Amino acid sequence: MNHRLLISGGRLIDPASGHDAPADLLIEDGHIAWVGPGAPPQELDAILDATGLVVAPGFVDLHCHLREPGYEEKETIATATRAATRGGFTTVCAMPNTNPPTDSAAIIDFIKEKARTKGVVKVLPVGCISKGRRGQELAEMAAMAAAGAVAFSDDGSPVSDPRLMRHALEYSLSFGLPIMEHAEDEALSRDGAMHEGEVSLRLGLRGIPAAAEEAAVARDIALARLTGAKLHLCHISTAGAMEMVRRAREEGLPVTAEVTPHHLTLTHEQVLAPVPYDTSAKVNPPLRAPQDVRALVDGLRDGVIDAIATDHAPHTAMDKLVEFDFAPPGISGLETALGALLALVHSGEMDLMTLVTRLTTGPAKVIGHPLGSLTVGLPADVVLFDPTREWVVDPTAFASRGRNTPLAGRALRGKVMATLAQGVLAYRDEAVSLSLSSQAEPQRIRG
Amino acid sequence: MSVGATPFNTARWGHTHVLDMDSFSLPDIEQVMETTDAMKEVLGRPIKRVPTFRGKTVATLFYESSTRTRASFELAAKNLSADVVSMAAATSSAAKGESLVDTVRTLEAMGVDVIVMRHTQSGAPYIAARHTKCSIINGGDGWHAHPTQALLDLYAIRERLGRLEGLRVVIVGDILHSRVARSNLYGMAAAGVEVTVCGPPTLLPPAFAAAFPGVRRETDLDAALDGVDVIMALRLQRERQEAGLLPSVEEYIARYQINPHRLSLARPGALVMHPGPVNQGVELSPEVSYGAASLIESQVANGVAVRMALLYLILGGEG
């Protein structure tokens, strides 16, 4: 007998179809079976009450550090994917700066196997551009693509050698997957701890100038023009970089870009106040100036930026409990992303459909996967969120091992209330009512 | 127990730590000055020691070598009869050995009351202060702050010129990398001093003006010196040339050294200061360094008294 779950009474937002209206969603055997107003004429095993909630496709995160293999004290595939469900993400791309780095088909297989046995959301591995992430020789990208890599990146570091970057882009043409570049000119950023500007000058910290990112973005766009290959720019953080991406898009180059929730909502002032030298506000690229934030929000709204990606970068408390210069960069971002981003909707800077688009079909398009939609027949990746519910960020309650967030103690408006990943109810806030029929098999719902 | 003939009021003092001058109001600065006056009286006695803090312990925790500042703090603590323990520590980004937070917690567990800390990295005393009940006195952190130096500078100026408010000061040299400059900017702003910062743009970036509103930025020294009351030259580290920030020391000398001609551009009777140690013949010409305008020895002499005053205020004046 088929198993049927109805998500009823919600406001359904589906960027793929442009739908934004009240509708119910029927999930049958883990797949989307029917979408529409009013209840379908079938017998149901369970009903999830979405009254007052937005029902949207599960979010797709192009940029996530799962830390496994090698840094399991910071995070594992098991903990990160649970954190993902708390944040409404049903697909996460696993960045390859693990130990060993994900530079071979064998490591891609390991990640897929771990995700299958321990994970609760879809994990799509990203392979290294260069062997060992050393920036010298190309990694076996075709073998990794065949094993399931969805993109290539040496993230954490840029590909410093422009010739190697050129070759990576050219080589990728044979399998058509994007090269995800962490754009940073390390000669300009070396030893920098935060954005170079008034705040770094006051705190006496060595700055990372906006030009360190912009010089690299300019080079990478020139190489995309030269090769015609797909370039995806990770975590764009400056107004200048944004403008270059805008021009590249107008020119018709195959360039896409992502921006993080923290670069969209926080500035370099976060390093000064409320807690001076707060290492949880140390991130790479650094939190930038207010005019950069405004440019990023504009670019996101206008569609110059395709995707919001968390750059979820968990670290242990001990990693961060050191001098600011010595702390590793990174923010644990999966569980706070939506709550932080909804501030852009509440302030009127963008509408909810645009925000959901940049979290679903936008990133799905970058990697060319049919994800992030509520189309009938697809596996049910669905998020239910309350766009106005207030909650206070308590990192000790995170599912992630990384409690490193500058939002600790902050009240956010908007909360993920339930997440279905591949048809399984992977997370549900107690406030969402789930009613089961007498014949229901709860294990099929809860997984 | 009081220090001198007059018992001192520490009741107004609201600081557990001394991290930087940006948290010091004008009344705070005046209180430090008054308390320093009393400490100077103690230092003028045949026996320069009072039993105020017998049984209290001050630790000096230096992650960067500094013979002068350390000696100044240790003498200050000993003059107040506090016990002094010295720890030299090595910084390491690879977290080899004991972390900063572990070290300050260990000192706290040993019963230390005040930790005087110098560190190579900006902000380190803030991290320490958040994780210990000990009082932290910042003895210099990276490029960021050196509040006791700023206080002794203010004291030395006030002692010689009789006031602070309305004075015009120019700070010359490597502003970008100078914790002395930053702390003085805050302290002087609070005290009503007009400050101009002056140096080559590689050592004084244009954004500095936005970072410190109210401070005048000038790259031409002769223009900056016109009619000022005090010239404060900063130490030039030779590695700035290796890092590509300066073409040569000779060119720096030609453009930014304080020599008798440049001194003549300032107000007659203007003072010359330097936090030390001076690169003789670089920041200052010998005629200026050892001349009548030089306040350098007085800065050093006042250092002990100012640090005694801060310890006194922080430890609450009662033994």
Image (spheres, coloured by chain):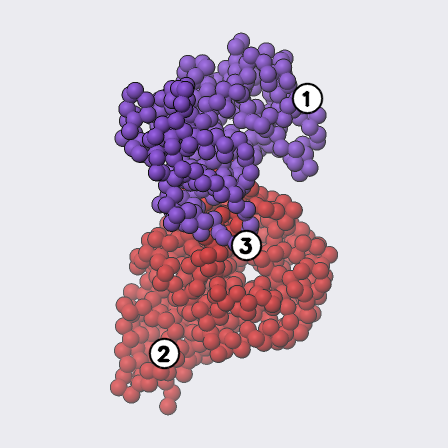
Chain colours: A red, B purple
Q: Is residue B108 above or below residue A48?
A: above
Q: Residue at x 50, y 32 (%)?
A: B71
Q: Is residue A15 above or below residue B34?
A: below
Q: Position of residue A9 (x, y in %)?
A: 30, 70
- Asked if badge 3 and badge 1 are on a common chain, one would say yes
- Horizontally, residue A42 falls left or right of residue A78, namely left
- The Cα–Cα distance between marks 2 and 1, rounded to whole angstroms, is 77 Å
Q: Quadrant of the N terminus of chain B?
A: top left
Q: How many other residues sit within 10 Å of disc 2, few (<14), some (14-19) or many (≥20)?
A: few
Q: Position of residue A28 (x, y in %)?
A: 39, 82
Q: Nearer the viewer, residue A229 or A152?
A: A152
Label 2 resides on the chain identified as A
Give the residue number, with chain letter if any, for mark 1: B254
Mark 2 residue type: Arg
Label 1 resides on the chain identified as B
Q: Position of residue B11 (x, y in %)?
A: 27, 30
Mark 1 residue type: Ala
